[in-house]
Image (cartoon, helix red, strand yellow):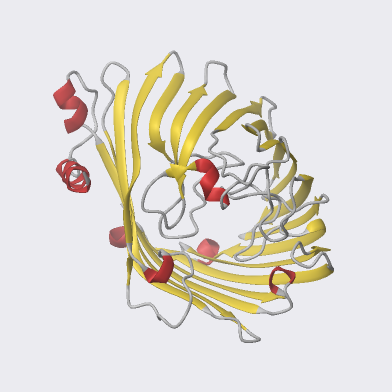
Amino acid sequence: MRKIVVGLLLLCLSTPAMAADSVKEMFASGKFKGKIELMHYTRDFNKGVTDNQDQAIGGVFYYKTDSFKGISLGAAFATTNDLDSDDEKGTYGLLAANHESVTRIQEYYVQGDYFDTTVKVGGQEVFTPFLFIHPVRMMPRTFRGTSVVNKSVENLKLMAFYLDAAADWDDENFVNISKIAGPIYANDGSVRDEAAIILGASYKLPIEGLDADVEAWGFKMDKVIDQYYLKAKLCKKINDVMLFGCMMYADQKDDGDALRIRSTGKTGIDTYQFGVDAGVAAYGFTFVATYSKTGDDPVYDPWGYSKAIVQQVLNAGLLADEDAYAARLSYDFSGLGAKGLSTYVFYAEYDGVATHSLESVDSNETNFDVQYAFSGSLEGLGLRVRHAIVDNYYGRGFDAKDTRFIVTYKF
C-alpha cells in the first residue's frame, strides 16, 4: 500500500491543477505538497532523572486529486527515521519507543463538495480545540472518521465531526481514539472503546474597522467526558499600531465517572479553564500578556487541546486550582532588512496543585526562539532553534532544559 501511495504522489508531482472533466483528469490534475524535516530534540534533567534525546529525519507528503462531479480523493504518508540517537537516553517523541523509526499512512479520504458543504470520510488531519494535529513532533497527530463543514451563510462556518480512531506522534497505525488517552477505563476496570462527537461554529463579526471572531464548540465521548469551549478574538489597527485581545473558556465534566486519572488513580473529572490575553504590535515588535485560571482538576487533554498558555514544555492546566501568568515579546527583523528572521522570548509562571502529590507547587518556564525562513531560490527552507528553561518540572521538584534544532523544507 505504501509503494502505491508513493508512486501516485511522484506521478502527480509536476502536474498542474485544472478542472477535471473526467476521472483520468481528476487524478492527472491533482496537487502534491509536503515537507521534509531534520530534527534534534534534547531534554536534560537534574537530580539523576534520565535525559531524553531524539535525532530524526522525515516528513509528511500529501496528494489530493482534482474534483470530478464534486468528488475528490486524498492520501498522505508520514515518516520519521532515526539518525543515530543516543540509546543511553530516553525517547523524546520524535521516534517510537527505543528510538524506533516509523512510517505510516497519514491520511486517506473521500471528499464531497456540494451546496457550500464539504464532507470528508476517512483518515484526516483535524483542527478543533479538543483534537488537532499538534505539529510539534515529526509526524502530526491524525484522526479517522467523518467531518462536515458548511459555509452557506456569509462569515459563518458550521462544523461537525464523528471520529473513532487516531494515530499519535509515534503510532504506526490508527487505533481506537479512546486508547490514545492511555487508555480510558470503565468503572469495572475494562477498557472503553468509544468515539468522539464534536460540533462547532465560528463567526466573523461584520463590524467595519474591527477584526472580530467568535467560536463555540462542544465535545462528547459517550460515558467518558463532555466538554465545551468558547473563544472570542478582537483586533483593531490604529495607524501603525495593532491592538488585540482574546478570551476563552472551557469546561470539562466526566460522563458516568468513567475516567481514571493515571497519575493519581482518581476517578472522574470536573474542571474548567478561563484565559484572557491582550497585546500590541508595532514596528516589528509584538507583546502579549496572558492570565489563565484552571479549576479543581487539571485539564484532560490526551488528544491535544487549545489551552490559554502553551509553551515548549509546560502549559496552563497541568496543575489543578492553577493560576498562570505569561508574557511574550517577539520581533520581526524584516524592517531592518533581514526578511524571514524573527525571534521571541516567552515567560510563564504556574501556581497550583500537583496531581501526583496533591501539594501546592510553583513552576515556571522561559522560552527562547530564533527562526529564519529563506526566500528567493531557497524559498521553502527554514531554520529554527528553540530553548526552554523549566524550574520545578511538572511540580516534581527537579528542573529541566529543553533544546530543539529544526530544519524544514516545504514544497
Q: Is residue 117 left or right of residue 379?
A: right
Q: Name the spot of residue 15 as percent of width and height, x first.
A: 18, 38
Q: Name the spot of residue 153 as percent of width and height, x first.
A: 57, 16
- Vertical placement of 155 versus 166: above or below? above
Q: Name the spot of residue 302 as percent of width and height, x first.
A: 59, 50
Q: Nearer the viewer, residue 210 or 150?
A: 150
Q: Name the spot of residue 84 as percent of width and height, x first.
A: 33, 78
Q: Nearer the viewer, residue 14 or 257?
A: 257
Q: Quadrant of residue 50?
A: bottom right
> Would residue 98 be seen by someone viewing this image from the given angle?
yes
Q: Quadrant of residue 213?
A: top right
Q: Nearer the viewer, residue 52 or 402?
A: 52
Q: Residue at x 38, y 32 (%)?
A: 122
Total labels: the figure holds 0
Farthest residue toward the front? Answer: 188
Q: Is residue 373 left or right of residue 362?
A: left
- Vertical placement of 377 versus 278: above or below? below
Classify the position of the N terminus by image quarter: top left
Q: Residue at x 21, y 36 (%)?
A: 16
Q: Is residue 83 left or right of residue 248?
A: left
